[in-house]
Amino acid sequence: MIKFFRRIRKKLLAENRFTKYLLYGIGEIVLVVIGILIALQINNWNEDKKTAKQEIKILNELKNDLETNLNEIIETYNTTRHRELSAVLILDYFDKAKPVDDSLKQAFENINMDGLFNISNTSYKFIESQGINSLSNDSLRIRVTEMYERHLKNILTREKINLEIINEELIPLMNDRFLSSPTIDKTVSFAVEAINTPKNIESLREDAIFKNVIVRLQNWLLVRLKWQQVARTNLEQLIADVEKEIDRLKLK
């Protein structure tokens, strides 16, 4: 194409047609500029594809972590709900002066067992280390940060308070006021002892200290349930939005 313009330019000069020669010269420059711009655009397009591919990989890893956290929250919620109902049952037994039976023993076993929620955050730590450019969707990046820095941390904070009540208040009282006997838990297939039998149920019913610990524990379990449900709802929506963002980037 450039050779074509060059031949025309020489012909115009030979014919002393300077104006047309100038126009063809400008056209040749424009053509070169357009070629450079097209090359730059192709290069930018290739870079965008490469960046999108990297971001899709990050989002897929993030999605896996979020799904792991969701499953963990669902399991933790069910356990917390079971323990909260056990606390309600114990208080009901106390108020109605019911005798000790297997249901009450199972409730005593349930309330002093707990475990911390384990956060899966490998992808989030990577996003943090890469800075603000790791996720192109500003809104999504803000929500991911909020999930890890607010919702999931709130769950851990409440769980730690529950553990303090159990380890520092409930278990010492139960060690003093209860006997160990075979567990009532039917899921346990081997012989194991559990602290589940009051030494004296009548005096335990009148034990204001023990009852107050059960009430406080139940209240904190309700707080945990609230934050677990909030986190679950937000996690489900966040996972759906991450999937949409992956689909959008695949179209680039």
Image: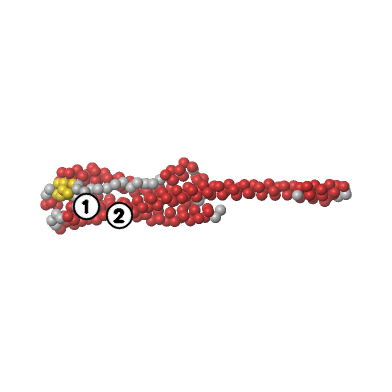
Element type where label 2 sits in the image: helix
- Numbered disc in front, either 2 or 1: 1
- In-image side of 43 versus 57 (left or right): right
Q: Earlier in the sequence, mark 2 or mark 1?
A: 2
The residue depicted at 26 percent of the width and 44 percent of the height is 164
The residue depicted at 31 percent of the width and 51 percent of the height is 76
| Mark 2: few/some/many CA within 10 Å (<14, 14-19, 20+) | few
Give x and y (percent) for residue 173.
Answer: 18, 45
Give x and y (percent) for residue 147.
Answer: 41, 49
Residue on which the image places disc 1: 185
- The reply to whether residue 209 is visible in this rendering is no
**Furthest-top residue in this view:** 129
- In-image side of 206 versus 63 (left or right): left
**Type of amino acid at the residue the image marks with label 1:** Asp
Element type where label 1 sits in the image: loop
The reply to whether callout 2 and callout 1 are in contact (CB within 8 Å) is no
| Front in this rendered view, residue 74 or 185 | 185
The residue depicted at 22 percent of the width and 54 percent of the height is 186
**Type of amino acid at the residue the image marks with label 2:** Asn
Give x and y (percent) for residue 99.
Answer: 13, 56
Residue on which the image places disc 2: 78
Q: For residue 33, which numbered disc appears in the image?
A: none
- In-image side of 229 versus 29 (left or right): left
| Mark 1: few/some/many CA within 10 Å (<14, 14-19, 20+) | some
Q: How many marks?
A: 2
Q: How is the image coloured?
A: secondary structure
- The reply to whether residue 181 is visible in this rendering is yes
The residue depicted at 19 percent of the width and 50 percent of the height is 183
